[in-house]
């Protein structure tokens, strides 16, 4: 009986090709839609966006085992390819891979790096997670001001848990209740 590792090495081109073919029809329909979600942004060229979306979708399918054997390493590979195009969803997903150590070595600093890139492009989950990292001092220096800023951005985009975290922070540290006070207390890197 073949072990899983042998299967993934020999079958990688076939699996990737099959995933590409399976996804190409839905992609064509989605790409022609008039509206583009704010998180669906990548480099300056529409070809970059199309490529990044496809790479992210392949990564998602590999991570979930959706139509292909679940393989976190392969998922991280595809998320990384899409993230290098500046694709916000892939940056978020790659951050998740690093945070949980799925397919890559667990690295909270790298998770923070990728979540910050996605958060800057308006991904509420990345903003929320980045706020958590700053609050706890995981992968970044502990900074309640930065945690508050990221949670406020996530809450403004509808993340309910970010609103709850802000309320808790305000109860525990009342000095972070007002936005102006948060700006004063936030550590700024030189």
Image: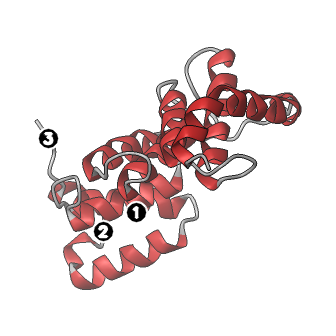
Secondary structure, mark 2, is loop
Residue 52, placed above or below residue 189:
above
Q: Quadrant of the C terminus?
A: top left
Q: On residue 178, which mark appears? A: 2
Label whose residue precedes the other's in the sequence (2 or 1): 1
Q: Residue at x 34, y 60 (%)?
A: 131
Q: Position of residue 117 (x, y in %)?
A: 41, 38
The residue labelled by disc 1 is 151
Closer to the camera in the image, 185 or 169? 169
- The answer for how far apart the CA atoms under marks 3 and 1 are is 19 Å
Q: Position of residue 7 (x, y in %)?
A: 61, 40
Q: Nearer the viewer, mark 2 or mark 1?
A: 1
- The answer for how far apart the CA atoms under marks 2 and 1 are is 13 Å
Q: Residue at x 83, y 35 (%)?
A: 22
The residue labelled by disc 3 is 189
Q: Residue at x 36, y 55 (%)?
A: 99
Q: Answer yes or no: do the residues labelled 3 and 1 have beta carbons within 8 Å?
A: no
């Amino acid at each position: 009986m073949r072990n899983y590792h042998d299967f993934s090495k020999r079958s990688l081109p076939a699996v990737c090709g099959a995933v590409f073919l399976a996804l190409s029809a839905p992609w064509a329909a989605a790409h022609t839609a008039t509206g583009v979600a704010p998180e669906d942004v990548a480099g300056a060229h529409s070809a970059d966006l199309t490529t990044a979306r496809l790479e992210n979708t392949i990564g998602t399918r590999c991570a979930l085992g959706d139509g292909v054997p679940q393989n976190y390493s392969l998922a991280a590979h595809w998320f990384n390819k899409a993230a290098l195009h500046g694709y916000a969803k892939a940056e978020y997903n790659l951050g998740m891979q690093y945070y949980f150590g799925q397919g890559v070595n667990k690295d909270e600093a790298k998770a923070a790096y990728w979540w910050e890139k996605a958060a800057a492009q308006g991904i509420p989950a990345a903003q929320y997670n980045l706020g958590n990292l700053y609050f706890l001092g995981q992968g970044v220096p502990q900074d309640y001001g930065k945690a508050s800023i990221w949670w406020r951005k996530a809450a403004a985009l509808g993340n309910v848990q970010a609103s709850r975290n802000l309320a808790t922070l305000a109860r525990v540290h009342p000095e972070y209740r007002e936005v102006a006070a948060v700006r004063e207390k936030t550590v700024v890197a030189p």
